[in-house]
């Protein structure tokens, strides 16, 4: 944050955005029903369970609705 954004799709929007916080939940589902059976903290995760390492936020353009990673909007905002 704190860098200028511009939407690479509609190309005009530099001010209206939705910042979408990504909050991963590590869960164990019942394979038959999809019900959450257990939920884990990062420390509790087994080595077989992949830890989320994606971006903390995604950005949506408030004009055209495009959703991309923050760096995509920031890179276009530089120009
Ligand atoms: Zn846009």
Image: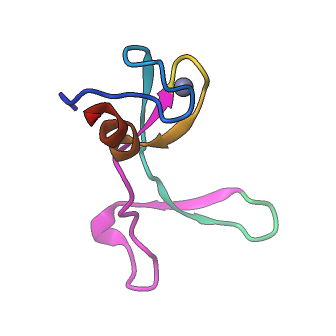
Q: Which residue lies furthest to the right in this view?
A: 32
Position of the C terminus by quadrant = top left
Q: Which residue is at 40% across, 63% downward?
A: 52
In depth, the one of 66 and 40 nearer the eye is 66
Ligand 1 shows up in the quarter that is top right
Q: Which residue is at 33% across, 70% downward?
A: 44
In depth, the one of 79 and 54 nearer the eye is 79
Quarter of the image holding residue 41? bottom left
Q: Which residue lies furthest to the left in this view?
A: 2
* Looking at the image, residue 52 lies above or below residue 14: below
The colour scheme is: rainbow
* Looking at the image, residue 10 lies above or below residue 56: above
Q: Which residue is at 39% across, 28% downward?
A: 6
In depth, the one of 5 and 21 nearer the eye is 5
Q: Does the magenta stretch include residue 34?
A: no
Q: Is residue 59 magenta?
A: yes
Q: What stretch is highlighted in magenta?
A: 35-60
Q: Residue 31: x, y in percent?
A: 75, 71
Q: Residue 49: x, y in percent?
A: 46, 77
Q: Which residue is at 26% across, 27% downward?
A: 4
């Amino acid at each position: 944050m704190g860098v200028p954004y511009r939407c690479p799709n509609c190309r005009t929007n530099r001010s209206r955005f939705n910042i979408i916080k990504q909050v991963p939940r590590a869960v164990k589902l019942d394979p038959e029903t999809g019900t959450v059976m257990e939920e884990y903290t990062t420390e509790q995760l087994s080595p077989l369970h992949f830890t989320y390492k994606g971006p903390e936020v995604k950005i949506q353009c408030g004009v055209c609705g495009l959703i991309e990673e923050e760096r995509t909007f920031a890179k276009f905002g530089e120009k």
